[in-house]
Image (spheres, rainbow, N blue to C red):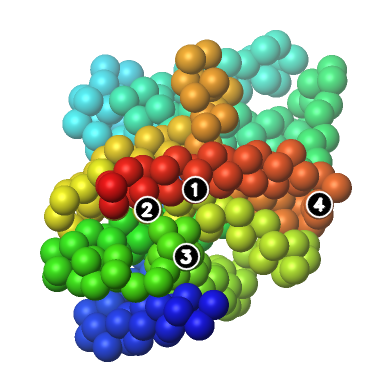
């Protein structure tokens, strides 16, 4: 145990004495959280809207004013003919176009259905889909104000994120992403750096077993991952104002198996690499990017092909993103998150076992 403790102290001192590592460990994650916290959002406001009002009545102007007064749209052009809308959509000057036909007010006054045309730029599917949904909600409000009501009225209730702020949904995922990147990248380069500096042979002649050597290498970076969470939490809670409805203890305990998975993957990468550059490239392109794509952090898993949906069960980030969003937004605990926790423990066991076997083989 004394030899193991000495190795732990040596690793921590090595981190402390590296002038480049401290900004990387503590400044870079905070910077990334700020950048991604603002950039990784699906909230859409001020969609460029072109209007073609062929009716030119008080009713049609009321509808146009409803679009202009909302925070969802910004009327960029009023045109006199429908043919003028296509060039605006093609050039990107407008993302959505609305045409109010002649006779719009007359149909409403006579009790007949009145129809307007909405054209959306489908080259950006998110803006197009959300823009059409915003437009439909505005038309519904105008109908209600005018006393024109549908036969069936829907009154939706949104749970856990009532304002539908994508920031509440995305920032916990960004936090998981930062923890994964930092712990995996640092661990993947740790053993490779020892080989490049020629100090690996010195470690091998110590009374440490391969298992103790692995523990001595991984524990300091596990502590780094936990410190990064403590550093990022005030930003998540007080700057981005993501609600924390669950238990901090639950979050901490369920973070441990995820960090074990990322450390194990980093160790596995280090056994497959000869240089730190190779370790960095292998971590980024073979292990990190697939996890980001398959975790559900950006793309819904249910929309993926069946083969890719099955592959997501091997992705630790998938389970940790569910844990973070559940603890932050829903306030759930172990009773609801035990399947994700069990999956992370199983993956951590398999990954660390594979990394240790590969490490022993490399030493041999």
Labelled pair 2, 1 in contact (Cβ < 8 Å): yes
Residue occupying image coordinates x 45% and y 41%: 354
Camera-side mark, 4 or 1: 1
The mark that comes first in sequence, 2 or 1, is: 2
Label 4 to label 1, Cα distance in Å? 24 Å
Q: CA distance from mark 3 to mark 1?
A: 13 Å
Check disc 4 and report the residue beneath it. Answer: 334
Front position among marks 4 and 2: 2
Which tag is nearer the camera, tag 3 or tag 4? Answer: 3
Observer-nearest residue: 47 or 244?
244
User: Answer yes or no: do the residues labelled 3 and 1 have beta carbons within 8 Å?
Assistant: no
- Gap between marks 2 and 1 measured at Cα: 8 Å
Q: Which mark is residue 352?
A: 1
Q: Nearer the viewer, residue 83 or 355?
A: 355
The answer to whether marks 3 and 4 mark residues whose Cβ atoms lie closer than 8 Å is: no
Residue 188 visible in rendering: yes
């Amino acid at each position: 145990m004394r030899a193991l403790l000495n190795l732990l102290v040596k690793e921590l001192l090595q981190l402390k004495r590296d002038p480049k590592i401290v900004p990387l460990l503590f400044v870079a994650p905070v910077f990334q959280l700020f950048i991604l916290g603002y950039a990784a959002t699906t909230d859409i406001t001020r969609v460029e809207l072109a209007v073609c009002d062929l009716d030119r009545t008080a009713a049609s102007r009321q509808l146009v004013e409803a679009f202009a007064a909302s925070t969802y749209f910004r009327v960029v052009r009023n045109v006199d003919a429908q043919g003028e809308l296509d060039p605006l959509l093609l050039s990107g000057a407008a993302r959505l176009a609305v045409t109010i036909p002649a006779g719009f007010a007359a149909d409403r006054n006579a009790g007949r259905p009145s129809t307007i045309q909405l054209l959306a730029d489908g080259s950006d599917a998110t803006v197009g889909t959300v823009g059409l949904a915003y437009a439909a909600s505005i038309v519904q409000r105008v109908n209600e104000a005018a006393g024109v009501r549908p036969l069936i009225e829907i009154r939706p209730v949104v749970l856990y994120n009532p304002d539908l702020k994508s920031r509440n949904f995305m920032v916990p995922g960004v936090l998981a992403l930062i923890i994964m990147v930092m712990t995996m990248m640092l661990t993947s380069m740790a053993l490779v750096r020892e080989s490049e500096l020629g100090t690996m042979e010195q470690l091998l002649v110590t009374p440490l077993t391969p298992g103790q050597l692995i523990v001595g290498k991984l524990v300091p970076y596990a502590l780094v991952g936990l410190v990064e969470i403590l550093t990022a939490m005030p930003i998540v809670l007080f700057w981005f104002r993501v609600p924390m409805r669950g238990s901090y203890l639950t979050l901490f305990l369920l973070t441990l198996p995820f960090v074990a998975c990322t450390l194990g993957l980093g160790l596995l990468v280090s056994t497959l690499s000869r240089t730190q550059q190779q370790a960095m490239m292998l971590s980024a392109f073979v292990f990190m990017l697939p996890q980001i794509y398959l975790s559900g952090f950006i793309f819904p898993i249910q929309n993926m092909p069946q083969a890719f949906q099955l592959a997501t069960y091997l992705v630790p980030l998938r389970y940790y993103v569910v844990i973070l969003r559940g603890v932050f937004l829903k306030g759930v605990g172990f009773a609801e998150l035990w399947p994700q926790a069990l999956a992370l423990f199983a993956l951590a066991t398999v990954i660390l076992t594979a990394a240790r076997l590969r490490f022993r083989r490399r030493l041999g």
